[in-house]
Amino acid sequence: MQHTNHSHQNPSSFLLMGIPGLEASHFWIAFPFCSMYALAVLGNMAVLLVVRSEPSLHQPMYLFLCMLSTIDLILCTSTVPKLLALFWANAAEIAFGACATQMFFIHGFSAVESGILLSMAFDRYLAICRPLHYGSLLSSESVSKLGAAALLRGLGLMTPLTCLLARLSYCGRVVAHSYCEHMAVVKLACGGTQPNNIYGITAATLVVGTDSICIAISYALILRAVLGLSSKEARAKTFGTCGSHLGVILLFYTPGLFSFYTQRFGQHVPRHVHILLADLYLVVPPMLNPIIYGMKTKQIRDGALRLLKRGPAQS
């Protein structure tokens, strides 16, 4: 295998390092990742199947949940199979085009998921603070438009990032990461990478900053409305629902922001800690989201039980 190190010639492929410093443990680390990936796929497929089979669940909250499950399936499937091949079979090589595609899916759909989480917060705000206008303000058409807007914004912002990557010349081939993370690949480039750095951090900060501020405002208004409820049971039920949502939101943003800014500014964070957390970020939230939303939502639980009972009867 020849290494391409010419200043003005791009490599046909890159080599993924995995988790630097933990190479000897790759084989064993792969087992929990494989288990989490299997749970993520089963959980999110179950949510999609339950909502699709239950007409009573064809409501905005559950339609947004289906969008979230679809995005989670895309996010973990774009990374974990290659990660397992790397850890178990030492399949470190990834074609340049495949690397750019993986990067586009990871960063693009992370931005899309942020938009869907914002839409879900808006849905909860309308349901709790404007219940009389909920049906008219959030129709099926409105849900579709919000989903399309999140998709177009997320993928639209990340398309230039991928194009900027393709224009660079590379002096190295070994990516110090388990997948094609944007900055890990940019660090291999020769010459100036300032446009990539500026665009990458601006796009991420714009998406996360705007969405997190709007989500915080939504939940502040929700909290004010909930505290004004006279019934303790109603307050407890609303807090339970909103608690699940906030748990998913924190699970998505906290490790994502840590990974993103550590790659740029966290020189004192050990590389194996940063990369292990970055790997977990793409599989743990997709695994836990169906549990947090599905298991804590009575309608989803009941739908899953009906589906299980119906399965043996039909066979």
Image (cartoon, rainbow, N blue to C red):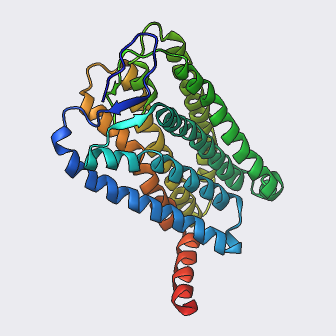
Residue, x 42% and y 24% (percent of image)? 185
Q: Look at the image and tell me in which quarter the N terminus lies.
A: top left
| The one of 220 and 163 positioned closer to us in this rendering | 163
Q: Is residue 271 left or right of residue 162?
A: left
The outermost residue toward the front is 2
The outermost residue toward the left is 24
Residue 274 x/y as whole percent: 31, 32
| The one of 164 and 151 positioned closer to us in this rendering | 164
Residue, x 35% and y 36% (percent of image)? 93
Labels in figure, total: 0
Residue, x 62% and y 40% (percent of image)? 115
Q: Is residue 176 left or right of residue 81?
A: left
Residue, x 54% and y 27% (percent of image)? 204
Q: Is residue 131 above or below residue 25?
A: below
Residue 55 x/y as whole percent: 71, 73
Residue 263 x/y as whole percent: 38, 24
Q: Look at the image and tell me in which quarter the C terminus lies.
A: bottom right
Residue 196 at least partly seen: yes
Please tell me in which quadrant of the rendered image residue 32 appears: bottom left
Residue 242 x/y as whole percent: 55, 53
Q: Is residue 7 above or below residue 308?
A: above
| The one of 82 and 315 positioned closer to us in this rendering | 82
Q: Is residue 173 left or right of residue 96?
A: left
Q: Is residue 7 above or below residue 311?
A: above
Q: Is residue 284 left or right of residue 70?
A: left
The outermost residue toward the right is 136
| The one of 112 and 95 positioned closer to us in this rendering | 95
